[in-house]
Amino acid sequence: MRRLTGFDCEGAWCAASLDEGDKTAGLLIVSGGNEIRSGAHAGQAALAAHVAALGYPVFRYDRRGIGESEGDNCGFESSAADIAAAVTAFRAQVLHLQHIVAFGNCDAASALALFHQGLPIDRLVLANPWVIETQTDADAPTPPSPAAIRARYWQRLKNPRSLGDLLTGKINLRKLASGIKAAAQNEKPRVLADRLAKALANSSVPATIVLARRDTTAMAFHSAWQSDSFDAVRARDKVTLETFDSASHSFADSDSKLWLCQIIRNALEPTNG
């Protein structure tokens, strides 16, 4: 059964949804970006229903200033209190809850990586963590990282049709040259990526990082993952990286959706008492 609920976060009322289940492990879903708790195309609501049907309670909420919640929206960098309050509310409303698996996509994954320490969270599932530095101009779109551009060009070069398109003039040579120049650029300083690496390296909480292989946000994270900053994280035996061949940032296609559900189920099962 699903019911509407809520909790207080530093004087602001946050709207939440609880899908009930009788197992002692539960799933906390943290929304990314400015999405409401149902997620893109109601994907998180569907995920909650799927997991609850397996017997696991699921708690979702609107961060302050988002959806039905009060307060100001200050972005994921200011969401530590929201996450902590949601964990407390989840445990208070599901009295038999013993273990929490926390899931987030995009900047919600980054927020969980940064702010989970000290909270009673037993396992993390971090999807397509956001490591792209924010633009100084709030109105300017964030360009794809050089790592994402390189990955896209590599995918095109592996396609035999691309050579034919080049020879027949279907590919704009000026745009091609511009793209190659952008791909050759060095990455900008990875301040956010370094912070995530430090947080995960210093954590004892098991974490599964999941990437949609052809998603640009995932490509940027994968590039950071391979850098020296993540050496200590890659060395942790309780941190695993899983990838799926999809371009869907929210795992919306049927195959990647099933894959993500299985990843989350695998994370929940060992923690169920």
Image (cartoon, rainbow, N blue to C red):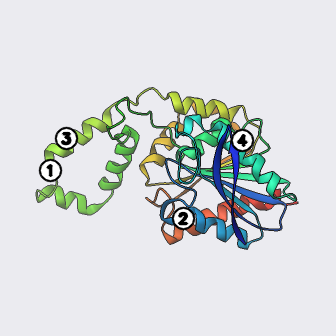
Q: Which residue is mark 4?
A: 84
Q: In the visual, does 273 lie left or right of 131?
A: right
- Amino acid carrying mark 3 in the image: Ala
Q: Which residue is mark 2?
A: 43
Amino acid type, residue under disc 2 in the picture: Gly
Q: Residue at x 65, y 70 (%)?
A: 49
Classify the position of the N terminus by image quarter: bottom right
CA gap, disc 4 and disc 1: 50 Å
- Is residue 116 among the parts visible in the rendering? yes
Q: Is residue 234 visible?
A: no
Query: What amino acid is found at the position of numbered circle 1 in the picture?
Result: Asn
In three-dimensional space, the C-alpha distance between marks 2 and 1, rounded to whole angstroms, equals 37 Å
The residue singled out by tag 3 in the image is: 177
> Which picture quadrant has residue 187?
top left
Residue 167 lies, in percent from the top left, at 13, 57
Q: CA distance from mark 4 to mark 2?
A: 23 Å
Residue 13 placement (x, y as % from top left): 65, 47
Foreground mark, 4 or 1?
4
Q: Secondary structure at mark 3?
A: helix
**Residue extending farthest left:** 169
